[in-house]
Amino acid sequence: MLTLSLLLSALLPQVLGCADHSNYHAPLHSKRQAINASDTLRIPTFWQYDNSQDWGKISPNYTLCQTGTQQSPIALLFNQGLSQAHRPYFTGYTANSTGKYYNWGYGPAFTFYHDEGVYDTLPSMQMDNETLYMTGWHVHAPADHTVGGDRSKAELHYVHYDATGRERAVIAIRLDPGQDDSPFFAQFPSPPIHFNDTSSIENMAIDPLQAIREVADFSNFWTYQGSLTSPPCKEGIRWFVARNILFTSVKQMQDLLGASTFSARAEQEVWLHQVNV
């Protein structure tokens, strides 16, 4: 079995490397439909989040998970201050951006439609005079990042690529229950698609800027050089973690958690991460 798993892990695309949703190019449909597991990007994996400390033992392709110098997630602290550099600008986040809503096997997720190899039609942000394109979002539960030792109930990740199709940045927003509904999550069906449900909702239009509005327009944040948070743990990813928490209602949070499974990688020690540099 070990030999087989090594072979398959080397051959399978790494579409769940912190939910790489860019490989899905769906036809447009107007209603929820049953689809097979591969259509929802549920590529079989031979690793688990609750055993993330041993990912490097599973495959030679995952060595970076053990040896990397900028692995994610890391613990963030209030006494680190907040970033004064690398501020993201979300001028290209347009309402009515269309895609597919589903569950990536660990929680709710969304992938924007785009032609294969074409990224400049996607919602975009500017960072350090570079335009990056958002391929989709997904939820981790509990949160990947802790702040001041506290781990939020969940964490929302906006995944961004450059024009060549290279992973470049993740916008991370911690999620906790509050009093009122979150307008961002109110855009989606209640309850969310369950982790055992391989159906999807196609041709769905959403406003990706809404989550940014709900965390004070992302005006305060930590940033660091990091990695994908699942194998192959690729580095060279700039992380932005919002200082503000996006609050959902209690019911919305219960729905999110009920649709999710454990997907938080063990925290990595700060090394060459250049926090807020």
Image (tube, rainbow, N blue to C red):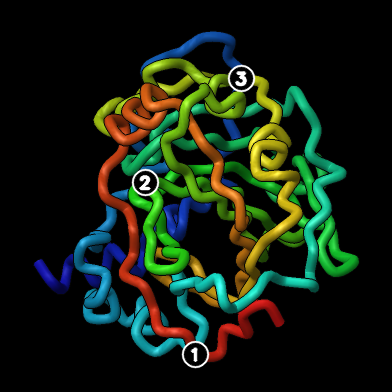
- The residue carrying mark 2 is 153
Amino acid type, residue under disc 1 in the picture: Trp
Dot 3 corresponds to which residue? 204
Q: Nearer the viewer, residue 232 or 217?
A: 217
Q: Position of residue 231 (x, y in %)?
A: 38, 67
Residue 89 appears left or right of 34? right
Give residue 181's mark.
none
- Number of disc labels: 3
Residue at 57% across, 77% down: 79
Could you say where residue 169 lies in the image, as x and y percent from the top left? Answer: 65, 62
Quadrant of the frame with the N terminus: bottom left
Q: Position of residue 65 (x, y in %)?
A: 37, 79
The disc label shown at residue 271, or none: 1
Q: Tell me if residue 45 comes above or below residue 237 in the rendering.
A: above
Q: Picture quarter containing residue 238?
A: bottom right
Q: Nearer the viewer, residue 196 or 207?
A: 207
Upstream in the sequence, badge 3 or badge 1? 3
Asked if residue 189 shows in the view, the reply is: yes
Q: Quadrant of residue 252?
A: top left
Amino acid type, callout 3 = Met
Label located before the other in sequence (2 or 3): 2
**Could you say which quadrant of the image residue 56 lies in?**
bottom left
- Compared to residue 208, the image places residue 231 above or below, namely below
